[in-house]
Image (cartoon, helix red, strand yellow):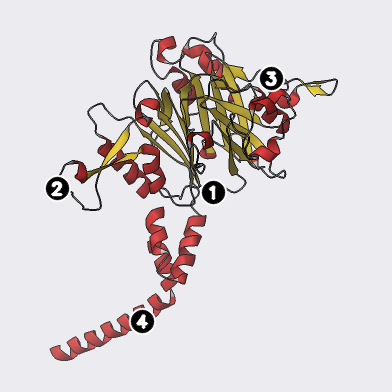
Amino acid sequence: MTEGRVGSSANNTDDISDISAVVLAGNFPLVVKHILSFLPAKQLNTAARVCKQWSQLAKEIRECRRSLAWFMAIPDEEEDSTSLADKIKIFLDGLWSEPHTVVAFMSSALYEEQLVLPNQTGRRQHCSRAAKCVKVELEQYIEEKLPSQCSLFGSAADGAVGTEWRSTRSVEVEGEKALTMLLLPHLPGLDILSFTMDIYSSETNWHMAIDELESRDVDITTISGIPPDKNVRAVLFFCDEPFCPPEIGHSILNKYKDAIVAGGYVDNLVVKPKPKSSDTSSEDSFPTILCLAFCGDNLRVWSVIIRESVSNAEDAEKQIRQLKTSEVSEEKSFAFMFACVGRGEGLYLQRNVESDAFHKVFPRTPLFGFFGNGEIGFNSLPGAVSSGHKSNIESKGERILPKLYHAYTTIICLFSVV
């Protein structure tokens, strides 16, 4: 009797296993998709190479992941570059959404250093310590860790403004090592296009000679390569040359009448892909101006200037609060802060005054930027008829442009994807 019952139980178990196998086989794509949904973007891309079915499932998963990500690192003096490299690698390897464009700001103190990494080739010449390590530029290391189709842009300046991951509380770092990155996925209704200029060269349509800037009728479309059907809402403008002709910014304002222009003067530009070096001089081919054009009907952009006269937290918050509007979707918003090196802690006698004021007004919006050598921008406020260059009056067929170049100010730009 006992054996019979055992045998009966075994047969039932086999039947259940058979039924489970049939059910599992019938729902195999759903099971695989569920498992793949737990993988970060990099591992998901690896799994997508298994077969066509997995590739399609991975594509469907990626389509549902369109979240912003950001990174902030402030290395201690005692922290070696290997530790910083590990932090960058761990963060990028664990990204949930695959980045399409990365905007990075770093302090010049960090930019001028090289990362010292373990030699992964395993080759050791004469057992020397140097053979155990390799030196890599910071921007090169970041490029290697990003997806091949991802674009990296940014700058190095005296200080950086950034937001730590899993937080929207921003930090201002002046004169110390710092790296911050905003990682943007491909968002519907948002295109980010870039173009560079070399003010000392006119060899190609991508470059502009100084003598061509005597007139404001410069053909920015030819230089930028931006298709005329693109709705340009903002142009971030970075220049590492202190004697950049102001006519360049004016030409951009004239061309893109409904867009804001904001940015500043920095120590170095970060551009990927880098321009090809010429046979004569690689320095001649490197751009002195980097512009990022944010385009799209679903994009809303506003900007405000914190004037030289503002020297306390209350007044700074009052200026920033002018950006507050019901049109801002803070879930898909980000902001940039371009401040003068003469502001910050030296002006307020304490750190993070302006970034804290911004966080108070926009508690869920990450903030990024730098402390530079001059600021570019103007007031373009929501609901204000008098703000922004697009509402400036025309006199005898010529538009009166707003003042674009400043000193001892802070420019804050708010972006929202609706």
The residue under the point 40% across, 78% down is 25
The residue under the point 64% across, 32% down is 208
Could you give the CA–CA distance between mark 3 and mark 2, rounded to whole angstroms? 64 Å
Relative horizontal placement of residue 249, taking residue 149 as reference (left or right): right
Could you give the CA–CA distance between mark 3 and mark 1, rounded to whole angstroms? 32 Å
The residue under the point 47% across, 47% down is 99
Q: Which mark is residue 126?
A: 2
Residue at which label 1 appears: 186
Q: Which mark is residue 402?
A: 3
Q: Which mark is residue 335?
A: none
Does residue 254 sit above or below 121 in this rendering? Answer: above
Crowding at mark 2 (Cα within 10 Å: few <14, some 14-19, many 20+): few
Q: Are marks 3 and 4 in contact (CB under 8 Å)?
A: no
Query: Given this view, does label 3 or label 1 mark the residue nearer the observer?
Result: 3
Query: Given this view, does label 2 or label 1 mark the residue nearer the observer?
Result: 2
Residue at which label 4 appears: 19
Q: Amino acid at mark 4?
A: Ile
Give 155 or 281, whichever is nearer the viewer: 281
In the displayed image of the protein, which residue is found farthest to the right? 396
Q: Amino acid at mark 2?
A: His
Q: Amino acid at mark 1?
A: His
Spot occupied by residue 10 in the image (x, y as percentages of width and height):
22, 85
Does residue 362 sit above or below 243 in this rendering? Answer: below
